């Protein structure tokens, strides 16, 4: 790509990375905070634990009557709120 893309466009792309990182974090946080995001996350958890019945039973013992999604969703949102997430992106 370096041979094809002119240097000024390469620099422009590099300069836009921080803004893009902030945008991804903002949208990710909004999505997982939304009802749709929570529902999608819950579906993903259900799929993950379908064949791991014993594991989900063990986890359920630790968290009590709360749904697993109610524990995991806030943690994912916290992930998006950390400054290190932007650095990783």
Image (cartoon, rainbow, N blue to C red):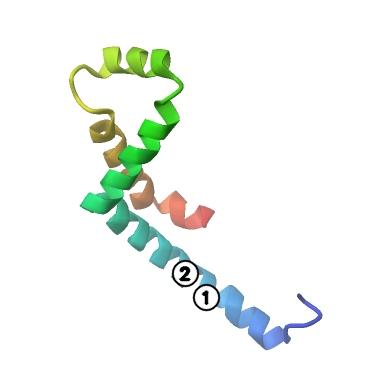
Label 2 Cα neighbours within 10 Å, binned few <14 / some 14-19 / many ≥20: some
- Position in image of residue 89 (x %, y %): 52, 57
**Labels 1 & 2 near each other (Cβ < 8 A):** yes
Indicate the quadrant where residue 29 lies: bottom left
Element under disc 1: helix
Up-down relation of residue 55 to residue 28 (above or below): above
The numbered mark at residue 59 is none
The numbered mark at residue 20 is 2
- Relative horizontal placement of residue 12, taking residue 51 as reference (left or right): right
Indicate the quadrant where residue 68 lies: top left
- Is residue 84 visible from the viewing direction of this image? yes
Quadrant in the picture for the N terminus: bottom right
Up-down relation of residue 52 to residue 79 (above or below): above
Indicate the quadrant where residue 30 lies: bottom left
Please tell me which residue lies in front, 6 or 82: 6
The numbered mark at residue 16 is 1
Looking at the rendered structure, the number of numbered marks drawn on it comes to 2
Residue at 31% over, 35% down: 72
Element under disc 2: helix
Residue at 56% over, 76% down: 15
Up-down relation of residue 38 to residue 65 (above or below): below
Residue at 27% over, 45% down: 39
- Relative horizontal placement of residue 82, taking residue 64 as reference (left or right): right
Please tell me which residue lies in front, 19 or 58: 58
């Amino acid at each position: 790509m370096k041979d094809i893309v002119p240097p000024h466009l390469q620099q422009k792309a590099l300069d836009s990375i921080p803004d893009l990182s902030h945008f991804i974090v903002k949208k990710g946080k909004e999505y997982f905070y939304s009802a749709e995001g929570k529902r999608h996350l819950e579906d993903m958890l259900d799929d993950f634990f379908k064949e791991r019945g014993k594991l989900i039973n063990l986890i359920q013992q630790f968290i009590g009557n709360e749904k697993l999604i109610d524990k995991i969703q806030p943690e994912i949102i916290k992930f998006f709120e950390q400054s290190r997430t932007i650095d990783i992106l």
